[in-house]
Amino acid sequence: MSKNLFRMFRDESCTAESFISKFQMLKEKLDEREETHLDSEYHRELKAYINRLYQQTCQNEHFDENEFSDIREAEMSNLNRLQKMKNRVSYKKDKHKSKHHHEDWG
């Protein structure tokens, strides 16, 4: 979902109306899925981010082009921060996999 949001914020042709429409569709699909409890900082932060952004945009009847324009850069930065958090976790996992793989060589 974060990649889709990032693309929408980065796409200069994306309007507030199209953003709300696409985001609502993505959120509905996400809400239809059975919730799996994942106790990682990344997943907790992503869930909180999606809920906050949804309230700020889709549930805000005054959300318009000006507000959408105002939040673009900040939200891309927030999504980058989340992506770095995700990458940091996967880097640690890959690092440990590599370490265990090399232990078999000795």
Image (spheres, rainbow, N blue to C red):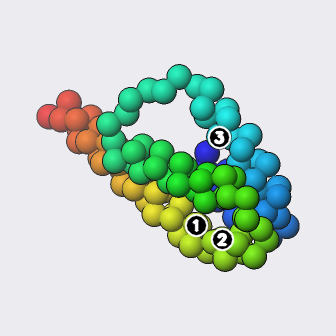
Query: Which residue lies at the image location 61% right of the left edge and 51% below the top edge?
Result: 54
Q: Which mark is residue 27?
A: 3
Which of the two residues, 32 or 10, is positioned nearer the viewer here? Answer: 32
Measured as percent of width and height from the top left, residue 93 is found at: 32, 42
Q: CA distance from mark 1 to mark 3?
A: 17 Å
Left or right, 2 with respect to 15, comes to left
Query: Which residue lies at the image location 72% right of the left edge and 44% below the top edge?
Result: 24
Q: Amino acid at mark 1?
A: Glu
Left or right, 13 with respect to 84, comes to right
Q: Could one spot residue 19 in this view of the protein?
A: yes
Which of the two residues, 73 or 31, is positioned nearer the viewer here? Answer: 31
Q: Residue 106 lies in what quarter of the image?
A: top left
Name the residue furthest top: 34
Callout 2: SS: helix
Q: Amino acid at mark 2?
A: Arg
Residue 14 lies, with reference to residue 46, above or below; the image says below
Mark 2 and mark 1 in contact? Answer it, CB < 8 Å: yes
Q: Could one spot residue 7 in this view of the protein?
A: no
User: Disc 1 designates what residue?
Assistant: 75
Instruction: For label 2, count other residues whose C-alpha is less than 10 Å away and answer few (under 14), some (14-19) or many (20+).
Output: some
User: Disc 2 designates what residue?
Assistant: 72
Query: Which residue lies at the image location 76% right of the left edge and 56% below the top edge?
Result: 19
